[in-house]
Image (cartoon, grey):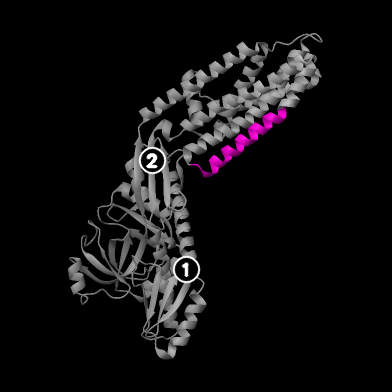
Amino acid sequence: MRKNLTQKTILILAILLIFIGGFVGIPKGFSPAAVKQSITDRIHLGLDLSGGTHLILQVMVSEAVGATSDSDLQRILTDLQTASATGATATKPDPKGQPQIIRVTGVPLDKDNAVRSVLEDHYAAQYDIASGADNSYTLTMKVSVVRDIEQRALQQSIETIRERIDNLGVSEPVIEEYGPGTNEILVELPGIDDPGRVKDVIQSTARLEIHEVLGGPYPDQQAALQGNGGTLPVNSELLKAEEGANAGGQYYLLNRIPIVAGTEFRDAQPSTDVNGRPDVSFTLTTSGGDHFYQYTSANIGKSMAIVLDNSVREVATIEGAIRDQGQISGGGITQEEAQNLSLMLRTGALPASIHFLEERTIGPSLGADSIRHGVEAAIAGLIAVLAFMLFYYHGAGINADLALILNLVILLGFMGYTHATLTLPGIAGVILTIGMGVDSNVLIFERIREELRAGKSPAAAVDQGFSHAFQTIIDTHVTTIVSAAILFLFGTGPVKGFATTLVFGLLANLFTAVFVSRVIFEANLNRRQRGEAISIG
């Protein structure tokens, strides 16, 4: 019996040391300041405690639908050429309002069957195809396909923003979907000290494309329309050159379908041009480089435009074949702008633009105040509970207090090992764990009292008390853990913090209340004479 008790005691002490190391770590010194810094490095504070920025973003998913239909439009134009349907063309009647609709017109009578066959074979899975007057066809993207594109755009936006934020070194950010079906993203950045730069990096789609120049430069939009007979050519768009770029402020008529698009850029790094000014060097993927080489080889002497976020960044004349490398320069680009742009291109373009719906900045003074009040509440609650257990259960109260302290050590150690983020609701979870731990001990102690009143010996009363209370403790803990799991699955950042601390605190409580407390009782009984009473109030 004593050997078994010794093994259990060694196990408890080992677990205690392991979890103390979890939240204390290895301090760089033995001063209180060094220990405090070591704890701070292992347990991060959430937005509501450390201060930071809270954002709610709206993803304009219709742009992702438009980008997909643009790609399909280019394929349809190629298919029409392959089918030798001379005079036939494909357009988007309303690219902004209804980006999911493509119209094919001008199909020759002798090619109608061939065109219909091509459309049905290649596009019927994604589009509802309807024939119209004058041998025309209308392709409307299926609702299920639109929803799939929108959902993928939202998830890609979350992943891209998370990668950009991680590259900026923000500690423990919260980046997740906000409200199912709203296409919104919640972003919380604890302790951020440069919200302006973070906001710029988040909101830029960084959609880099290279387009064929069809006309320009024009001094304004009116001149561009007059130069093209009052209407823009099919599948073209008019974009303004960014101020500071070559021919800045002027307008260019571009082929709306890019030569190479954002997904074909493999890497980007800040660099300098021949004059030592900051610029960005980019590298294309193998397929993108091959396509770019074919285009530039066939169009030497013509102009192309580098377009970033729907603004002409640079216009250049093709002087020779280019395969897979290039630079974005000019326009007085600063070193920080070059770093930001290369970061955004490396992490991938957002599939759609971002609108800021809500922005709140929480100051660190509020965080410090929240920490102080939260810690004061936790300490006050802990002291009150410890004192009550000592007063009401006498010697057994020491047993409960030791188990409760070990419970908190295990919980803090878990948070340290997982580098969990502690939020104000998380502190509430810790306090609730204290209450649940006391509840378990009360159940056990009251059962032991009942067994003693029934005339059982102290050893038998302890054994029966733990056995009878065990099932009730399991039931209460499981139901609470299930509720906390639901909060974690469907809650936002702070709510998840509450659920995490509560769940692990309850698991730790099962160990301390059922196992540790019983070991302490057994050690106490071993020191007493057979039949000697135990102190339990």
Residue, disc 1: 142
Q: Label 2 is placed on what type of residue?
A: His
Residue 106 in the figure: left or right of residue 494: left
Picture disc at residue 28: none
Residue 11 in the figure: left or right of residue 404: right
**Over which residues does the magenta segment extend?**
470-491
Q: Is residue 141 magenta?
A: no
Q: Label 1 is placed on what type of residue?
A: Lys
Residue, disc 2: 54
SS at badge 2:
strand
Residue 73's x, y, as percent?
41, 73
Q: Is residue 480 magenta?
A: yes
Instruction: Indicate the quadrant containing the C terminus: top left, top right, bottom left or bottom right.
Output: top right
Residue 13 appears in which quarter of the rendering?
A: top right
SS at badge 1:
loop
Residue neighbourhood size for the residue with mark 2, other residues' Cα within 10 Å, grouped as few (<14), some (14–19), many (≥20): some
Residue 45's x, y, as percent?
46, 32
Q: Gap between marks 1 and 2, in whole Å?
A: 36 Å
Viewer-side residue, 160 vs 511: 511
Residue at 60% x, 34% y is 480
Residue at 43% x, 31% y is 49
Q: Is residue 312 above or below residue 14?
A: below
Is the magenta region chiefly helix, strand or loop?
helix
Q: Is residue 383 above or below residue 352?
A: above
Viewer-side residue, 356 vs 211: 356
Residue 156 in the figure: left or right of residue 7: left
